[in-house]
Each structure stands twice: as C-alpha cells, then as structure tokens.
Amino acid sequence: MIFQCIKPNILCKILVNRIRCGSLYLLSTMINFPFNVQVCIECLNSKGLLKAAFRHVLSNRAGVYGFQNIATGEIVYIGSTVDLWKRLMQHILGQKSNVILQNAFSRYGLASFRFLVFSYVSLEEQNSTAENRSMLLAAEQRFLDSFKPRYNINPNAGSSFGYRHTPDNLAKMSGENNPIFGRTGENNPIFGRTGENHPI
C-alpha cells in the first residue's frame, strides 16, 4: 500500500490548515510500504508538530502500532493500546516504555524512527473489558508473529506477568545499556521537571 508520510520540515500552520480541510496526513514524500499502514509519523522529535497534527487522530483510538528504524526499514517494536496518542507520548517521554526501545532512542535519536499504526481496533461497548482486551491482544499477536520485532522482550502479546527475562535480555536492560546509566544532574532527562512536567 502506498501511504504518504509527514516529514518534520512541514510547517505546523500548513499542516493544521490541511487537517481542518479534511486531508489528514496527505503530505510530503510517498513511502511504499510492503504492508498495510494506517498512519505513519516521522517527526517524533518535534512534539509541537506531533500534537498539532496527530493528537486528534490518535486520541482515544485503540489499535496496534509499531516503531520502524528508518535507515534499515526494520520493524523493531510492536505494541497495542486503547489510546494510541497516550501510548505514543509515553514512549517518546520514556514513561512505561520498553527499555530496549528507550536504549535505541537514546543511542540513535528519535529522528531515526517512524511510528506506525498498523491497525485500528474497534472496541465494542457491549463487550466486557476482558473481551475487548482479548480482541486487541489477538490483533497485536498477528503482527508480532509476522514481524518478530527484536525490541519486544516478550514474543507474546499482553502482560509480561510471570515472564522471566533471559540473561541476554537482562544484560540489554542494565548497566551501561540502561538509557539513564551515568546520567546525573543536568544530564538526566527528568532533571528540573516538576509538577505536571514530571514524568512520574
């Protein structure tokens, strides 16, 4: 499927005007994905642009998402959520995020990754929370099985409760591999954050 992807050099004003006119993310260069993609975001390090362009598109929408390494084209992480906007922001801000993915963000920079929405999932009000969760996780599992992303610690969709990390994965998450290792004072990403800006 051919899909147009927003690049970070698009002016926010133009973007917002186009969104108001109804042409949501039909901007910038064409990217030919060999798989179905609903949304592609390539400006992860431009929070203002992200908010202006995508908050209303992703907020309160459930679905399966992933991160793609732009240089290699590899899908490195896949997840699912009931609120795609909230989950994207958690990953970008390093809150409740995959440690290996955070290591990659620290090492290569957010600009090296795309955020993709593979599939929206309609959660039914008449279904129980457990039924909706099961439906969402089943959708995520299909993409996990297809792409086998290497940053996903657990190859099975859902909670990692009861999952034991392998020694290799533990090594990837600790010591110098930890994105905050040795970052004290002003070098710490949460240095000086207080109130609503504090990530905890």
Image (spheres, helix red, strand yellow):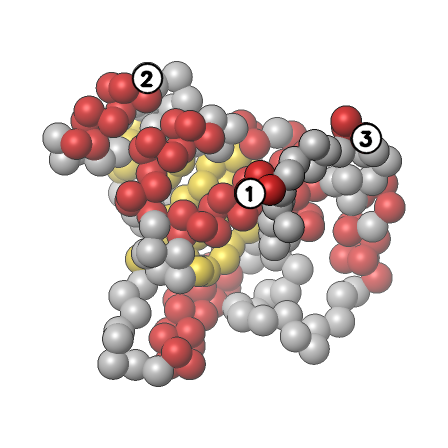
Where is mark 3, residue-wise? Answer: 185
Amino acid type at mark 2: Leu
- The label number, if any, that marks residue 152 in the structure image: none
Where is mark 2, residue-wise? Answer: 11
Where is mark 1, residue-wise? Answer: 196
Amino acid type at mark 1: Glu
Q: Secondary structure at mark 2?
A: loop
Q: Secondary structure at mark 1?
A: helix
How far is disc 1 from disc 3 in space, using C-alphas?
Answer: 20 Å
Amino acid type at mark 3: Gly
Looking at the image, is mark 3 or mark 2 nearer the viewer? 3
- Residue 87 sits above or below residue 144 on the image: above
| Residue drawn at x 33%, y 48% as measured from the top left | 58
Residue 146 place in picture, x, y as percent: 47, 59
Residue 99 appearing in the image: yes
Looking at the image, is mark 1 or mark 2 nearer the viewer? 1
